[in-house]
Image (cartoon, rainbow, N blue to C red):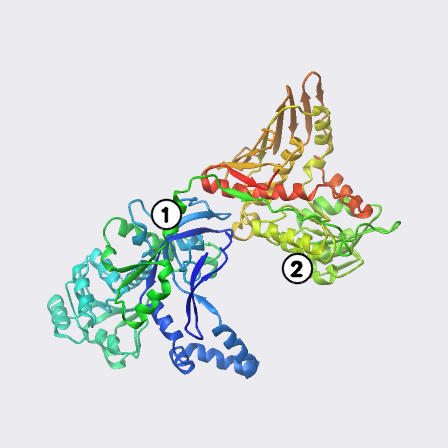
Amino acid sequence: MKQVVQNYKSGELAVLDVPVPGCKPGGVLVRTSYSLISTGTELMKVSEAGMSMVGKARSRPDQVAKVMQSVATNGLPATYRKVMGKLDSYTPLGYSLCGVVEQVGAGVDDVKVGDLVACAGNEHALHAEVNWVPRNLYARVPEGLAPRHAAFGTVGAIALQGVRQGGPQLGEVALVIGLGLIGQLVVQLLAAAGVRVVGADPDPARCALAEGLGAVACGGPGSAVVENAVAELTDGHGVDQVYLAAGGDSNQPVELAARLCRDRGRVVDIGKCRLDLPWNAYYEKELDVRFSRSYGPGRYDPEYELEGRDYPIGYVRWTERRNLACFLDLAARGRVDVEPLVSHVADFADAVETYRSLEEGGLKAVAVLFRYPEAAEAAAETEKPVVAVPEVPRVSRGSAAKPAVRAGSPVRLAFVGAGNYATSMLLPHLAGREGVELSAVVTTTALSAANARHKFGFARATTDLDAVLGDDAVDAVFVVTRHSSHAELTRKALLAGKAVFVEKPLALSGDELAGVLAAVEESGNDRLQVGFNRRFSPLLREAKERFGARTGPASLRYLVNAGRLEHGSWYLRQNSEGSRFAGEGGHFVDTASWLLDADPVSVYAVATPGNEDLQVVLGYPDGSTATIGYVTTGAPGFPKETLDLVGDGKVLRLDDFVRASVHGKKRWVSSRLPKARDKGQNAELAAFVRAVRTGGPMPVPLESLVATTAATLAVRTALAGGVPVTLAGTP
């Protein structure tokens, strides 16, 4: 894709070919329809980049102070290299756009593929063909609002937050100093709120524009027009509030604000202008000086902007996302009109020339839009989405992988992670097992490692992962950590030449899955098993054997009564740990595929509001289907897992790994298990240890592990698009 960038050292502007961003959990991929140039903020940045180093330093004294501190701490040579490296690199431009949702990340349920959204953020709403935008930095565009108008959403939110800081009331009088893009929007918002507005700007064309958009009178900052209008509208008392929407080095705006504001009036700084407050003037009137921080509460808070943690509406009524949505609503209802502000619409391919024309003064504009013609074509596509299944490398095992353990020696295992699942479902089956040695346990906290060592007899406990991976005395590594770390830890262990047992999921994204396979190819080590244990359940294996071979397609129904999670469960951290189904669903996909003796070729999914209950339909090469109902709203007393396989005049029934039956020409019913359900962990671990000891095949082929993971991840795409997803690359 293409993106507008600038080199801050040289001032060079360019449209670069860059990779399409990945769709991370907690956000959406948006294909841009229109993006807006902020003729104030962005042109200031472009202008600064063209300055000499001395000019740059004078324009950013805050950064100079940071550099001096770095010199004192790290020395001049190191600081110089750091600063030059940062300056001599490309930086993005843009922060306000409208586009079409192209892909929905895990944990996002308020928009779907094809929705039109307005996006904000100088790291996310860039002048680029595709952007990844976190959930608190986009808002759905109301019906009837044109995409080119919705592209004003971010600057509209900035203006709206400024007005909120002023606290206007019906009948008051306000002065707006600076009638650029933000100032014009502030004028309209105040007029819509029942406030009479006077505007001040040296540009007569902007003054005329503001009067046409609702201002009572406008004129130059020092003109009699402004002073007379204020005197007439306020009976000589002065305006109730002043909005500083001007830029530049002049101190005239703050001086004019003090002169024309009433006693105990409010002065709100929205723009970036000089603020040498004349002490006497502000003191004598006891003026209330307020600052408006960009789009509103949440700005610059990474937990809000990147992790999607909203502020409770009862405590923070207007966040930056709510401001964005509010402005879009006002524009859709005609209370704000942005069309008169559009001075020029340029094709995105002409971005560099457009910036240069603005900077050099050839193009005089209040607002300029970039138009992306590809977006309309992308939004019109209705064909089925395709999710690629990464190709599994053909591995000829070399020295990186240990094919077998020396005869008579134990299989030496290391555990990375010793949480509840590891200590309750895996380690009890391994501790004391003949031919197994628990060599090391690695955790992030020393105490948990010490506890695991004490309880299960590990030879050593450590927090140093690299030391364990580099230890030739370790044959296999178990990855039993939180979901977000599985792929990276697996990749590292494979590259270290270890056999790997990773609990589900193997990966939370296509990129993570591809990274694991790249490690397989690079190392020549394909000794990998994912903890899909249900296919190893003795009860289910016997039932499959009793069912026998099939000659035609079959239908499988798998109901998972998952139940609700306790408050505070880390499973709920979808932004970092992926959706609950992405983490757990591979179990059920793998079981269905094993029973049907094939890997899925298509995925379709629907969900109740909030994605609490899912229905996932998998298609298989021979026409077989598997429907997985993953529900959280069922009765706690109902069995957790029930399964029916129907085909060739036979029915296999599994009741929560307690009882199984097969109905056909002959009927078979298992005896009820007397104790705990055996979901196959013990048999799976035995198979893995045997494969490590002998160098034989892993318990589940790598191709199957990859296909199951890809199908599980494709559920998200299917939910977002509302149509079946084809798994490209499957047989």
**For residue 360, side relative to residue 705 (left or right):** left
Q: Quadrant of residue 45?
A: bottom left
Amino acid carrying label 2: it is Thr
Q: Residue at x 72, y 45 (%)?
A: 426
Q: Nearer the viewer, residue 592 or 35?
A: 35
Q: Which residue is mark 1?
A: 376
The extreme top residue here reads: 665
Q: Nearer the viewer, residue 297 or 496?
A: 496
Question: Residue 444 shows which numbered tag?
Answer: 2
Q: Helix, strand, or loop for circle 2?
A: loop
Disc 2 to disc 1, how far (Cα)? 49 Å
Query: What is the x, y in percent for residue 520?
Result: 68, 52
**For residue 175, side relative to residue 718 (left or right):** left
User: In this picture, is 625 found above or below 574?
Assistant: above
User: In this picture, is 619 found above or below 583?
Assistant: above
Query: What is the x, y in percent for residue 656?
Result: 65, 31
Q: Helix, strand, or loop for circle 1?
A: helix
- Report whether residue 138 is seen: yes
Q: Earlier in the sequence, mark 2 or mark 1?
A: 1
Neighbour class for label 2 at 10 Å: few (<14), some, many (≥20)? some
Amino acid carrying label 1: it is Ala
